[in-house]
Amino acid sequence: MATTNRQFVLGKRPEGTPDRDTFELEEIEVPEPEYGEVLVRTLSLSVDPYMRGRMDEAESYAESWQVGEPMEGAVVGEVVESEHEAWSAGAFVTGNLTWSEYATAHGDRLSPVEPGENLGLEAHLGVLGMPGRTAYFGTRDVLDPYPGDTVVVSGAAGAVGSTVGQIAKLAGTRVVGFAGSEEKVRYLEEDLGFDVGINYTETDDYREALDEAAPDGVDRYFDNVGGPISDAVFTRLNVDATVAVCGQIDTYNATEAPTGPRKLPMVIAPRATVQGFLVFDYEPRFPQATEHLREWVEAGDIEHRETVVEGFENAPDAFLGLFSGDNIGKQVVKVAEPDS
């Protein structure tokens, strides 16, 4: 085992879009697990859009990182040492750990990772991790689509949106997805089974594009993005439509509150329901979601993809790539190969 350990801490609070100076790389000692703890060697770590909010001082649903403190996120790793009866060296685990090559955590905060057919370790950060569970509960519980509904997904080629669209297709719906390149649109239509993909970077009029892709209007909208795309979708909502507000990445780096069309008048005539949700509220049901998602993946009913950035030192670049649309599917950082 290595005797040194690298970790990323929050170097400064960003103003607007973060850059490399937002992150500071430190070299520290490998920690020793105390009673009840486990020492984990990071194999892959997750970068996710919600982390942008944790860089700000403003209060939110996720606790802010303090300047100089280690950053945190979902990790898949291998147990090196264990002071917890449930874990032994060589076990694969996942949990929220610091952005470091080695980290300790209480054993009760870790979950087992079981690779399977069509499932590498990284899948536990994507389709079987927080993004997959977000898609599962956001689609099945919040949107609750019926056969024949038209479902629109923004950020459709990302980790959450790509799974949302496929779950909606399994429910017998017509699915339209917004994505940021022709490559992503092909991925939606040819690999994932979306009925129509819309390249928003090449579309001048989102309303007109929706009229062509969803001529019968929109019954369910899964919103990962906000901004002008959502402004357009709200004008096309059908009676009794439902909107699940998952994320608003379009505004995460805004230095001033953006203004746009007022949306509340648009929900009156269709009597639409607009609901924000957090996946953490469904934590008691996480095993149910993971089981269903694993069954779908292993049966070939749900496809998944990970965009892998190699090297722990490149974790900041992987995170920043989320805001420039570098990833298709889940963005992960490959840190090391397993020993066992």
Image (spheres, grey):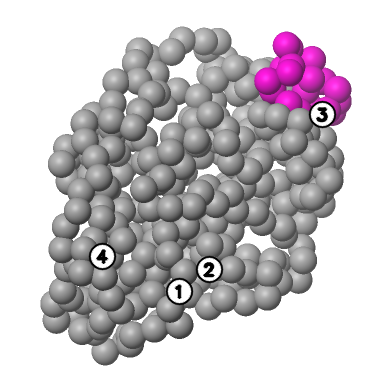
Instruction: Give me the C-alpha separation between circle 1 and circle 4.
Output: 15 Å
Residue 87 falls in image quadrant: bottom left
Q: Quick check: 148 left or right of 206? A: right
Mark nearest the camera among 1 and 4 is 1
Q: Nearer the viewer, residue 174 or 81?
A: 81
Q: Is residue 133 visible to us here?
A: no
Q: Label 2 amino acid?
A: Leu
Q: CA distance from mark 1 to mark 3?
A: 46 Å
Q: In the image, what residue occupies the spot 28% across and 32% down? A: 22
Which residues, given as a range, are shown in magenta? 198-219
Of the numbered discs in the image, which one, if any, rests on residue 121? 2
Distance between the Cα atoms at labels 4 and 2? 18 Å
Mark in the foreground, 2 or 3:
2
* Distance (Cα) linking label 2 and label 3: 37 Å
For mark 2, does the 10 Å Cα neighbourhood hold few (<14), some (14 to 19), or many (20 or more) residues?
many
Tell me the number on the disc at residue 59.
none
Q: Nearer the viewer, mark 3 or mark 4?
A: 4
Q: Position of residue 232 (x, y in %)?
A: 66, 18
Image quarter where the C terminus lies is bottom left
Task: Examine the image and state in which quarter residue 203 appears.
Answer: top right
Residue labelled with disc 1: 338
What residue would you read off at disc 3? Answer: 214
Residue type marked 3: Ala
- Report if residue 258 lies within the magenta region: no
When asked about the image quadrant of residue 1, the answer is bottom left
